[in-house]
Amino acid sequence: MDKSDKNKSRKFDVPFEEIKRQREYVNLAKTVLETRFGLIEPLAYVHTFGCQGNVADSERMKGWLAQMGYGFTEEIEQADFVLYNTCAVREHAHDRVFGNVGALKPIKEKKPHMIIALCGCMMQQEHVWQKIKKSYPFVNLVFGTHAQHRLPELMYKALCGGKRVFEVENSDGFIAEGVPVRRDGSFKGWLPIMYGCNNFCSYCVVPYVRGRERSRTPEAVIAEANELIASGCRDITLLGQNVNSYNRDSGEMNFAELLKQINNIDGDFKIRFMTSHPKDCTFELLDTMARCEKVSRHLHLPFQSGNNRVLKEMNRGYTREKYLSLIEYARKVMPDISLTSDIIVGFPGETYEEFCDTLSLIKEVEFTSLYTFIYSPREGTKAASMPDPVSREEKGKWFRELTSAQEQIAAKRSQKMLGQTYRVLCEEHSGGMLSGRTDGNVMIDFPGDESRIGEFVNVKVTACRNWTLSGEIAD
Ligand code: 5AD
Ligand code: SF4
Protein backbone atom coordinates (compact mmCIF):
# COMPACT_ATOMS: atom_id res chain seq x y z
CA MET A 1 0.00 0.00 0.00
CA ASP A 2 1.51 3.36 -0.94
CA LYS A 3 1.33 6.42 1.27
CA SER A 4 -1.45 8.18 -0.65
CA ASP A 5 -3.69 5.10 -0.21
CA LYS A 6 -3.09 5.23 3.53
CA ASN A 7 -4.46 8.74 3.75
CA LYS A 8 -7.60 7.85 1.86
CA SER A 9 -10.67 7.51 4.01
CA ARG A 10 -12.61 4.28 3.87
CA LYS A 11 -16.36 4.13 3.33
CA PHE A 12 -17.04 3.76 7.03
CA ASP A 13 -14.67 6.49 8.25
CA VAL A 14 -16.51 9.49 9.69
CA PRO A 15 -15.07 12.58 7.95
CA PHE A 16 -13.06 14.93 10.13
CA GLU A 17 -15.50 17.75 9.22
CA GLU A 18 -18.29 15.79 10.91
CA ILE A 19 -16.34 15.62 14.18
CA LYS A 20 -15.61 19.35 13.82
CA ARG A 21 -19.36 19.93 13.43
CA GLN A 22 -19.97 17.95 16.61
CA ARG A 23 -17.47 20.19 18.45
CA GLU A 24 -19.58 23.16 17.39
CA TYR A 25 -22.61 21.43 18.88
CA VAL A 26 -20.67 21.00 22.13
CA ASN A 27 -20.53 24.79 22.43
CA LEU A 28 -24.14 25.21 21.42
CA ALA A 29 -25.28 22.64 23.99
CA LYS A 30 -23.17 24.35 26.66
CA THR A 31 -24.81 27.68 25.90
CA VAL A 32 -28.32 26.19 26.14
CA LEU A 33 -27.44 24.50 29.44
CA GLU A 34 -26.23 27.81 30.87
CA THR A 35 -28.76 30.25 29.44
CA ARG A 36 -31.94 28.23 29.36
CA PHE A 37 -31.44 25.96 32.36
CA GLY A 38 -29.01 28.04 34.41
CA LEU A 39 -26.81 24.95 34.71
CA ILE A 40 -23.16 25.97 35.02
CA GLU A 41 -22.04 22.64 36.46
CA PRO A 42 -24.62 20.11 35.23
CA LEU A 43 -24.33 16.51 36.37
CA ALA A 44 -24.63 13.33 34.30
CA TYR A 45 -25.37 9.80 35.45
CA VAL A 46 -24.12 7.26 32.90
CA HIS A 47 -24.82 3.56 33.37
CA THR A 48 -23.44 0.88 31.06
CA PHE A 49 -24.94 -2.57 30.55
CA GLY A 50 -23.18 -5.42 28.78
CA CYS A 51 -19.71 -5.97 27.45
CA GLN A 52 -16.44 -4.03 27.53
CA GLY A 53 -17.20 -2.73 24.04
CA ASN A 54 -20.11 -0.84 25.58
CA VAL A 55 -17.87 0.37 28.41
CA ALA A 56 -15.43 1.77 25.83
CA ASP A 57 -18.30 3.44 23.96
CA SER A 58 -19.53 5.01 27.19
CA GLU A 59 -16.04 6.38 27.87
CA ARG A 60 -16.25 8.18 24.55
CA MET A 61 -19.73 9.53 25.20
CA LYS A 62 -18.54 10.70 28.63
CA GLY A 63 -15.72 12.46 26.78
CA TRP A 64 -18.26 14.49 24.83
CA LEU A 65 -20.33 15.16 27.96
CA ALA A 66 -17.26 16.37 29.87
CA GLN A 67 -16.55 18.82 27.05
CA MET A 68 -20.12 20.09 27.35
CA GLY A 69 -19.32 20.89 30.96
CA TYR A 70 -20.94 17.89 32.63
CA GLY A 71 -19.57 16.46 35.84
CA PHE A 72 -20.46 12.88 36.76
CA THR A 73 -22.48 11.47 39.64
CA GLU A 74 -23.33 8.00 40.90
CA GLU A 75 -26.64 9.27 42.34
CA ILE A 76 -29.44 9.34 39.78
CA GLU A 77 -31.47 11.79 41.88
CA GLN A 78 -28.70 14.37 41.55
CA ALA A 79 -28.38 14.07 37.79
CA ASP A 80 -29.56 16.56 35.19
CA PHE A 81 -28.86 14.02 32.49
CA VAL A 82 -29.29 10.24 32.66
CA LEU A 83 -27.83 7.98 30.00
CA TYR A 84 -28.32 4.22 29.83
CA ASN A 85 -26.04 2.46 27.37
CA THR A 86 -27.90 -0.79 26.74
CA CYS A 87 -27.09 -4.40 25.82
CA ALA A 88 -29.23 -6.69 23.65
CA VAL A 89 -27.24 -9.92 23.87
CA ARG A 90 -29.49 -11.74 26.33
CA GLU A 91 -33.02 -11.30 27.64
CA HIS A 92 -31.79 -10.67 31.16
CA ALA A 93 -29.92 -7.46 30.23
CA HIS A 94 -32.89 -6.39 28.08
CA ASP A 95 -35.34 -6.80 30.98
CA ARG A 96 -33.04 -4.97 33.39
CA VAL A 97 -32.93 -1.95 31.09
CA PHE A 98 -36.73 -1.72 30.98
CA GLY A 99 -36.87 -2.12 34.78
CA ASN A 100 -34.35 0.68 35.28
CA VAL A 101 -36.04 3.02 32.82
CA GLY A 102 -39.43 2.48 34.46
CA ALA A 103 -37.90 3.47 37.82
CA LEU A 104 -36.85 6.83 36.36
CA LYS A 105 -40.43 8.08 35.93
CA PRO A 106 -41.04 9.25 39.53
CA ILE A 107 -37.53 10.75 39.68
CA LYS A 108 -38.15 12.80 36.57
CA GLU A 109 -41.53 13.95 37.91
CA LYS A 110 -39.67 15.62 40.77
CA LYS A 111 -37.04 17.03 38.42
CA PRO A 112 -38.78 17.95 35.15
CA HIS A 113 -35.70 19.44 33.46
CA MET A 114 -33.93 16.05 33.66
CA ILE A 115 -33.03 14.69 30.21
CA ILE A 116 -33.33 10.90 29.95
CA ALA A 117 -31.47 9.19 27.12
CA LEU A 118 -31.16 5.57 26.03
CA CYS A 119 -28.52 4.37 23.61
CA GLY A 120 -26.56 1.29 22.55
CA CYS A 121 -27.43 -2.09 21.10
CA MET A 122 -31.07 -2.37 22.23
CA MET A 123 -31.90 0.97 20.65
CA GLN A 124 -30.82 -0.40 17.30
CA GLN A 125 -33.75 -2.86 17.46
CA GLU A 126 -36.98 -1.51 16.03
CA HIS A 127 -39.31 -3.37 18.40
CA VAL A 128 -37.43 -1.82 21.34
CA TRP A 129 -37.41 1.81 20.25
CA GLN A 130 -41.03 1.53 19.14
CA LYS A 131 -41.94 0.36 22.64
CA ILE A 132 -40.00 3.28 24.20
CA LYS A 133 -41.71 5.69 21.82
CA LYS A 134 -45.15 4.39 22.72
CA SER A 135 -44.95 3.46 26.39
CA TYR A 136 -42.14 5.57 27.91
CA PRO A 137 -43.03 9.18 26.99
CA PHE A 138 -40.67 10.59 29.63
CA VAL A 139 -37.62 9.36 27.68
CA ASN A 140 -36.33 12.37 25.71
CA LEU A 141 -33.56 10.96 23.59
CA VAL A 142 -33.01 7.56 21.97
CA PHE A 143 -30.08 6.72 19.71
CA GLY A 144 -28.51 3.54 18.42
CA THR A 145 -24.88 2.41 18.21
CA HIS A 146 -24.43 4.09 14.82
CA ALA A 147 -25.21 7.59 16.11
CA GLN A 148 -23.00 7.62 19.21
CA HIS A 149 -20.34 9.88 17.73
CA ARG A 150 -23.07 12.49 17.15
CA LEU A 151 -23.98 12.82 20.83
CA PRO A 152 -23.36 16.62 20.99
CA GLU A 153 -25.80 17.27 18.15
CA LEU A 154 -28.40 14.92 19.64
CA MET A 155 -28.00 16.47 23.09
CA TYR A 156 -28.39 19.95 21.65
CA LYS A 157 -31.62 18.92 19.93
CA ALA A 158 -32.93 17.26 23.10
CA LEU A 159 -32.00 20.29 25.22
CA CYS A 160 -33.73 22.70 22.86
CA GLY A 161 -36.91 20.91 23.84
CA GLY A 162 -40.09 20.42 21.93
CA LYS A 163 -39.86 17.07 20.24
CA ARG A 164 -38.40 13.84 21.53
CA VAL A 165 -35.33 12.82 19.54
CA PHE A 166 -35.04 9.34 17.97
CA GLU A 167 -31.90 8.58 15.94
CA VAL A 168 -32.11 4.85 15.32
CA GLU A 169 -31.42 4.36 11.64
CA ASN A 170 -29.87 1.07 10.64
CA SER A 171 -26.43 1.15 9.06
CA ASP A 172 -23.37 -0.94 8.29
CA GLY A 173 -21.64 1.25 10.87
CA PHE A 174 -18.90 3.86 11.13
CA ILE A 175 -15.52 4.50 12.68
CA ALA A 176 -15.17 7.91 14.29
CA GLU A 177 -11.64 9.03 15.22
CA GLY A 178 -10.99 12.24 17.12
CA VAL A 179 -13.79 11.75 19.65
CA PRO A 180 -12.72 12.78 23.18
CA VAL A 181 -12.43 9.99 25.77
CA ARG A 182 -13.02 10.22 29.51
CA ARG A 183 -11.66 6.98 30.90
CA ASP A 184 -13.13 5.27 33.94
CA GLY A 185 -9.75 4.15 35.26
CA SER A 186 -6.18 5.37 35.03
CA PHE A 187 -4.19 2.12 35.15
CA LYS A 188 -6.54 -0.13 33.15
CA GLY A 189 -7.58 0.87 29.67
CA TRP A 190 -10.01 -0.41 27.04
CA LEU A 191 -8.78 0.00 23.49
CA PRO A 192 -11.26 -0.78 20.70
CA ILE A 193 -9.46 -2.01 17.59
CA MET A 194 -12.50 -2.94 15.53
CA TYR A 195 -16.27 -2.76 15.56
CA GLY A 196 -19.19 -4.84 14.27
CA CYS A 197 -19.38 -8.49 13.36
CA ASN A 198 -19.87 -10.46 10.13
CA ASN A 199 -20.18 -13.91 11.63
CA PHE A 200 -23.92 -14.22 12.15
CA CYS A 201 -23.75 -16.98 14.73
CA SER A 202 -27.37 -18.11 14.57
CA TYR A 203 -28.19 -17.22 18.20
CA CYS A 204 -26.56 -13.80 18.26
CA VAL A 205 -28.05 -10.36 17.81
CA VAL A 206 -24.73 -8.49 17.64
CA PRO A 207 -24.34 -8.46 13.82
CA TYR A 208 -27.80 -6.87 13.54
CA VAL A 209 -27.18 -4.08 16.04
CA ARG A 210 -23.48 -3.33 15.57
CA GLY A 211 -23.16 -3.39 11.80
CA ARG A 212 -20.47 -4.92 9.61
CA GLU A 213 -16.96 -5.70 10.75
CA ARG A 214 -14.61 -2.74 10.35
CA SER A 215 -11.13 -2.11 11.75
CA ARG A 216 -9.50 1.03 13.07
CA THR A 217 -6.23 1.79 11.32
CA PRO A 218 -3.05 0.46 12.98
CA GLU A 219 -1.89 4.09 13.24
CA ALA A 220 -5.00 5.06 15.25
CA VAL A 221 -4.73 1.99 17.52
CA ILE A 222 -1.00 2.36 18.14
CA ALA A 223 -1.36 6.10 18.80
CA GLU A 224 -4.05 5.38 21.41
CA ALA A 225 -1.91 2.62 22.96
CA ASN A 226 0.98 5.10 23.23
CA GLU A 227 -1.31 7.67 24.82
CA LEU A 228 -2.59 5.14 27.36
CA ILE A 229 0.91 4.02 28.33
CA ALA A 230 2.19 7.60 28.56
CA SER A 231 -0.67 8.39 30.95
CA GLY A 232 0.36 5.51 33.28
CA CYS A 233 -1.89 2.71 32.06
CA ARG A 234 -0.56 -0.74 33.05
CA ASP A 235 -3.13 -3.06 31.57
CA ILE A 236 -4.50 -2.52 28.06
CA THR A 237 -7.31 -4.68 26.69
CA LEU A 238 -7.70 -4.64 22.91
CA LEU A 239 -11.38 -4.98 22.06
CA GLY A 240 -13.38 -6.34 19.16
CA GLN A 241 -16.08 -8.96 18.56
CA ASN A 242 -13.54 -11.04 16.67
CA VAL A 243 -10.06 -9.57 17.07
CA ASN A 244 -8.50 -12.38 15.03
CA SER A 245 -10.00 -10.94 11.87
CA TYR A 246 -8.53 -7.47 12.44
CA ASN A 247 -7.97 -5.83 9.04
CA ARG A 248 -9.07 -8.95 7.18
CA ASP A 249 -10.70 -6.92 4.41
CA SER A 250 -7.89 -4.47 3.80
CA GLY A 251 -5.05 -7.00 4.01
CA GLU A 252 -3.17 -4.33 5.99
CA MET A 253 -1.45 -5.21 9.28
CA ASN A 254 -3.08 -8.33 10.79
CA PHE A 255 -3.83 -8.90 14.47
CA ALA A 256 -0.63 -10.84 15.22
CA GLU A 257 1.45 -8.01 13.75
CA LEU A 258 -0.56 -5.41 15.67
CA LEU A 259 0.18 -7.28 18.90
CA LYS A 260 3.89 -7.25 18.10
CA GLN A 261 3.84 -3.51 17.43
CA ILE A 262 2.07 -2.73 20.71
CA ASN A 263 4.39 -5.14 22.51
CA ASN A 264 7.32 -3.08 21.18
CA ILE A 265 6.15 0.11 22.89
CA ASP A 266 8.44 0.96 25.83
CA GLY A 267 7.03 0.66 29.32
CA ASP A 268 5.92 -1.74 32.03
CA PHE A 269 2.43 -2.80 30.96
CA LYS A 270 0.42 -5.86 29.98
CA ILE A 271 -1.67 -6.42 26.87
CA ARG A 272 -4.89 -8.41 26.88
CA PHE A 273 -7.39 -8.90 24.10
CA MET A 274 -10.92 -10.11 23.61
CA THR A 275 -12.75 -11.72 21.98
CA SER A 276 -10.99 -14.32 19.86
CA HIS A 277 -13.03 -16.50 17.56
CA PRO A 278 -11.76 -20.10 17.21
CA LYS A 279 -12.50 -20.15 13.48
CA ASP A 280 -10.02 -17.28 12.92
CA CYS A 281 -7.51 -18.05 15.67
CA THR A 282 -4.27 -19.09 14.01
CA PHE A 283 -1.11 -20.83 15.14
CA GLU A 284 0.67 -17.64 13.98
CA LEU A 285 -1.30 -15.67 16.57
CA LEU A 286 -0.46 -18.19 19.30
CA ASP A 287 3.22 -18.09 18.32
CA THR A 288 3.12 -14.31 18.47
CA MET A 289 1.52 -14.38 21.91
CA ALA A 290 4.25 -16.73 23.07
CA ARG A 291 6.97 -14.39 21.78
CA CYS A 292 5.51 -11.13 23.13
CA GLU A 293 6.47 -10.80 26.78
CA LYS A 294 3.91 -8.05 27.43
CA VAL A 295 0.98 -10.09 26.13
CA SER A 296 -0.76 -11.77 29.06
CA ARG A 297 -0.67 -15.54 29.16
CA HIS A 298 -4.44 -15.57 28.96
CA LEU A 299 -6.62 -16.60 26.05
CA HIS A 300 -10.37 -16.10 26.10
CA LEU A 301 -11.54 -18.43 23.35
CA PRO A 302 -15.32 -19.01 23.40
CA PHE A 303 -16.29 -22.48 22.14
CA GLN A 304 -20.05 -22.20 22.93
CA SER A 305 -20.69 -25.96 22.49
CA GLY A 306 -18.60 -29.11 22.49
CA ASN A 307 -20.85 -30.90 20.00
CA ASN A 308 -20.25 -30.70 16.25
CA ARG A 309 -23.91 -30.80 15.19
CA VAL A 310 -24.77 -27.96 17.59
CA LEU A 311 -21.72 -25.96 16.47
CA LYS A 312 -22.90 -26.31 12.87
CA GLU A 313 -26.42 -25.15 13.79
CA MET A 314 -24.85 -22.24 15.63
CA ASN A 315 -22.94 -21.37 12.43
CA ARG A 316 -19.67 -21.22 14.33
CA GLY A 317 -17.41 -22.40 11.51
CA TYR A 318 -15.20 -24.84 13.47
CA THR A 319 -15.42 -28.28 14.99
CA ARG A 320 -14.67 -29.60 18.47
CA GLU A 321 -11.51 -31.20 17.03
CA LYS A 322 -10.27 -27.90 15.53
CA TYR A 323 -10.95 -26.15 18.84
CA LEU A 324 -9.02 -28.78 20.79
CA SER A 325 -6.12 -28.59 18.35
CA LEU A 326 -5.87 -24.83 19.01
CA ILE A 327 -5.83 -25.46 22.75
CA GLU A 328 -3.19 -28.15 22.36
CA TYR A 329 -0.98 -25.84 20.31
CA ALA A 330 -1.53 -22.90 22.70
CA ARG A 331 -0.39 -25.10 25.61
CA LYS A 332 2.57 -26.39 23.63
CA VAL A 333 3.93 -22.90 22.98
CA MET A 334 2.73 -21.40 26.31
CA PRO A 335 2.61 -24.18 28.94
CA ASP A 336 1.42 -21.74 31.62
CA ILE A 337 -1.43 -20.25 29.57
CA SER A 338 -4.72 -19.59 31.32
CA LEU A 339 -7.79 -20.43 29.25
CA THR A 340 -11.31 -19.06 29.60
CA SER A 341 -14.39 -19.49 27.45
CA ASP A 342 -18.06 -18.68 26.84
CA ILE A 343 -20.66 -21.46 26.68
CA ILE A 344 -24.32 -21.55 25.72
CA VAL A 345 -26.44 -24.26 27.34
CA GLY A 346 -29.73 -25.35 25.77
CA PHE A 347 -29.34 -24.09 22.21
CA PRO A 348 -32.61 -24.92 20.32
CA GLY A 349 -32.74 -28.66 19.61
CA GLU A 350 -29.70 -29.50 21.78
CA THR A 351 -30.16 -32.89 23.46
CA TYR A 352 -28.77 -33.96 26.82
CA GLU A 353 -26.27 -36.24 25.03
CA GLU A 354 -25.06 -33.27 22.98
CA PHE A 355 -24.80 -31.15 26.10
CA CYS A 356 -22.63 -33.93 27.59
CA ASP A 357 -20.09 -33.18 24.83
CA THR A 358 -19.81 -29.66 26.24
CA LEU A 359 -19.35 -31.13 29.70
CA SER A 360 -16.63 -33.49 28.52
CA LEU A 361 -14.84 -30.66 26.71
CA ILE A 362 -14.58 -28.52 29.84
CA LYS A 363 -13.28 -31.53 31.77
CA GLU A 364 -10.72 -32.20 29.08
CA VAL A 365 -9.46 -28.61 28.77
CA GLU A 366 -9.72 -27.55 32.43
CA PHE A 367 -10.42 -23.87 31.90
CA THR A 368 -9.45 -21.31 34.52
CA SER A 369 -12.97 -19.91 34.45
CA LEU A 370 -16.08 -19.94 32.28
CA TYR A 371 -18.85 -17.55 31.32
CA THR A 372 -21.88 -19.81 31.03
CA PHE A 373 -25.27 -18.76 29.67
CA ILE A 374 -28.60 -20.44 29.14
CA TYR A 375 -29.70 -19.87 25.56
CA SER A 376 -31.87 -16.77 25.26
CA PRO A 377 -33.91 -16.31 22.07
CA ARG A 378 -33.21 -12.99 20.35
CA GLU A 379 -35.77 -11.53 17.97
CA GLY A 380 -34.66 -11.53 14.33
CA THR A 381 -31.94 -14.19 14.72
CA LYS A 382 -32.07 -17.52 12.90
CA ALA A 383 -32.09 -19.59 16.09
CA ALA A 384 -35.13 -17.72 17.43
CA SER A 385 -37.29 -19.52 14.86
CA MET A 386 -35.80 -22.99 15.46
CA PRO A 387 -37.87 -25.57 17.40
CA ASP A 388 -36.83 -25.44 21.05
CA PRO A 389 -38.49 -28.38 22.80
CA VAL A 390 -36.38 -28.60 25.99
CA SER A 391 -37.94 -26.79 28.97
CA ARG A 392 -36.23 -23.94 30.78
CA GLU A 393 -36.26 -26.06 33.93
CA GLU A 394 -34.40 -28.89 32.20
CA LYS A 395 -31.86 -26.44 30.75
CA GLY A 396 -31.42 -25.06 34.27
CA LYS A 397 -30.44 -28.56 35.45
CA TRP A 398 -27.84 -28.91 32.68
CA PHE A 399 -26.55 -25.44 33.51
CA ARG A 400 -26.05 -26.38 37.17
CA GLU A 401 -24.34 -29.60 36.18
CA LEU A 402 -21.92 -27.58 34.05
CA THR A 403 -21.21 -24.93 36.66
CA SER A 404 -20.65 -27.46 39.43
CA ALA A 405 -18.22 -29.41 37.21
CA GLN A 406 -16.37 -26.16 36.53
CA GLU A 407 -16.28 -25.31 40.24
CA GLN A 408 -14.44 -28.56 40.90
CA ILE A 409 -12.00 -27.87 38.06
CA ALA A 410 -11.40 -24.31 39.31
CA ALA A 411 -10.88 -25.55 42.88
CA LYS A 412 -8.28 -28.05 41.65
CA ARG A 413 -6.50 -25.36 39.63
CA SER A 414 -6.53 -22.99 42.60
CA GLN A 415 -4.93 -25.69 44.78
CA LYS A 416 -2.10 -25.91 42.26
CA MET A 417 -1.49 -22.16 42.66
CA LEU A 418 -0.93 -22.53 46.41
CA GLY A 419 2.63 -21.60 47.42
CA GLN A 420 3.40 -20.05 44.02
CA THR A 421 4.27 -16.38 43.50
CA TYR A 422 2.55 -14.30 40.81
CA ARG A 423 2.99 -10.79 39.49
CA VAL A 424 -0.28 -9.03 40.14
CA LEU A 425 -1.63 -5.60 39.25
CA CYS A 426 -3.24 -4.05 42.36
CA GLU A 427 -6.71 -3.00 41.29
CA GLU A 428 -8.94 -2.48 44.30
CA HIS A 429 -8.75 -1.85 48.01
CA SER A 430 -11.28 -2.55 50.72
CA GLY A 431 -11.03 -3.25 54.45
CA GLY A 432 -7.22 -3.24 54.42
CA MET A 433 -7.11 -5.77 51.60
CA LEU A 434 -5.88 -5.23 48.07
CA SER A 435 -7.07 -7.34 45.20
CA GLY A 436 -5.59 -7.83 41.79
CA ARG A 437 -5.42 -10.14 38.82
CA THR A 438 -2.59 -12.37 37.75
CA ASP A 439 -1.39 -12.48 34.18
CA GLY A 440 -3.81 -15.39 33.70
CA ASN A 441 -6.73 -13.25 34.93
CA VAL A 442 -7.10 -14.93 38.34
CA MET A 443 -8.08 -12.69 41.27
CA ILE A 444 -5.99 -12.78 44.46
CA ASP A 445 -6.75 -10.89 47.71
CA PHE A 446 -3.86 -9.80 49.94
CA PRO A 447 -3.21 -7.31 52.74
CA GLY A 448 -1.71 -4.03 51.59
CA ASP A 449 -1.94 -0.30 51.44
CA GLU A 450 -4.34 1.56 49.16
CA SER A 451 -1.41 3.60 47.82
CA ARG A 452 -0.26 0.56 45.86
CA ILE A 453 -3.29 0.58 43.57
CA GLY A 454 -2.11 0.64 39.96
CA GLU A 455 1.27 -0.98 40.83
CA PHE A 456 2.52 -4.43 39.93
CA VAL A 457 3.50 -6.47 43.00
CA ASN A 458 4.63 -10.05 43.53
CA VAL A 459 2.11 -11.99 45.58
CA LYS A 460 2.62 -15.43 47.10
CA VAL A 461 -0.59 -17.46 47.29
CA THR A 462 -0.96 -18.65 50.88
CA ALA A 463 -4.55 -19.85 51.07
CA CYS A 464 -7.25 -21.03 48.78
CA ARG A 465 -10.89 -21.53 49.71
CA ASN A 466 -12.81 -23.04 46.82
CA TRP A 467 -11.75 -20.78 43.96
CA THR A 468 -10.99 -17.67 46.04
CA LEU A 469 -7.29 -17.11 46.48
CA SER A 470 -5.52 -15.05 49.10
CA GLY A 471 -1.88 -14.31 49.61
CA GLU A 472 0.76 -11.87 50.77
CA ILE A 473 3.07 -9.43 49.06
CA ALA A 474 6.41 -11.14 48.47
CA ASP A 475 8.51 -8.14 47.30
N1 5AD B 1 -28.24 -16.60 24.38
C1 5AD B 1 -27.34 -16.92 25.32
N2 5AD B 1 -26.07 -16.51 25.29
C2 5AD B 1 -25.70 -15.73 24.25
N3 5AD B 1 -24.51 -15.18 23.94
C3 5AD B 1 -24.65 -14.48 22.80
N4 5AD B 1 -25.91 -14.57 22.36
C4 5AD B 1 -26.58 -15.35 23.25
C5 5AD B 1 -27.91 -15.82 23.32
N5 5AD B 1 -28.81 -15.51 22.40
C6 5AD B 1 -23.30 -15.40 24.74
C7 5AD B 1 -22.22 -16.12 23.93
C8 5AD B 1 -21.24 -15.03 23.65
C9 5AD B 1 -21.38 -14.16 24.89
C10 5AD B 1 -20.87 -12.77 24.75
O1 5AD B 1 -22.77 -14.14 25.11
O2 5AD B 1 -21.65 -17.13 24.73
O3 5AD B 1 -19.92 -15.49 23.49
FE1 SF4 C 1 -22.15 -12.81 18.12
FE2 SF4 C 1 -20.81 -14.76 16.85
FE3 SF4 C 1 -20.30 -12.18 16.26
FE4 SF4 C 1 -19.53 -13.17 18.64
S1 SF4 C 1 -18.78 -13.84 16.62
S2 SF4 C 1 -20.58 -11.21 18.27
S3 SF4 C 1 -21.18 -14.63 19.11
S4 SF4 C 1 -22.22 -13.30 15.90
Image (cartoon, helix red, strand yellow):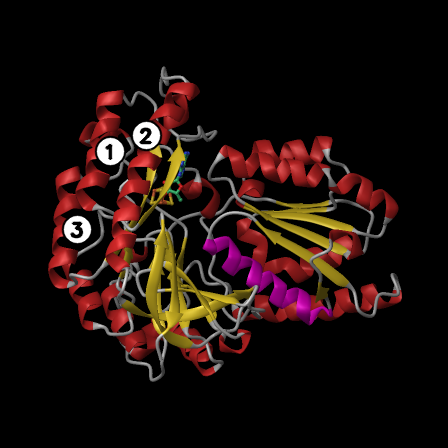
Which dot, 3 or 2, sits closer to the camera?
2
The answer to which of 120 and 329 lies nearer the viewer is 329
Q: Quadrant of residue 157?
A: bottom right
The answer to which of 247 and 108 lies nearer the viewer is 108
Residue contact at pointers 1 and 2, CB within 8 angstroms: yes
Q: CA distance from mark 1 to mark 2?
A: 8 Å
Tell me the kind of residue under disc 2.
Glu
Residue contact at pointers 3 and 2, CB within 8 angstroms: no
Give the structural element (helix, strand or loop) at label 3. helix
Q: CA distance from mark 3 to mark 2?
A: 23 Å
Q: Residue at x 24, y 33 (%)?
A: 359
Number of other residues with Cα within 10 Å of mark 1, as a class: few under 14, some 14 to 19, many 20 or more: many
Q: CA distance from mark 1 to mark 3?
A: 16 Å
Tell me the kind of residue under disc 3.
Ile
Which span is picked out in magenta?
52-69
Label disc, if present, on residue 401 of the rendered structure: 2
Number of other residues with Cα within 10 Å of mark 3, as a class: few under 14, some 14 to 19, many 20 or more: some
Q: Residue at x 53, y 51 (%)?
A: 146
**Residue corresponding to mark 1:** 359
Q: Determine whether the beta carbon of the residue marked 2 sits less than 8 angstroms from the nearest atom of ligand 1.
A: no
Instruction: Identify the mark nearer the N-term, 3 or 2.
Output: 3
Q: The C terminus appears in which quarter of the rendering?
A: bottom left
Label disc, if present, on residue 450 of the rendered structure: none
Q: Horizontal and vertical percent for residue 112?
A: 86, 48
Q: Horizontal and vertical percent for residue 61?
A: 60, 61
Q: Quadrant of residue 430?
A: bottom right
The answer to which of 361 and 435 lies nearer the viewer is 435
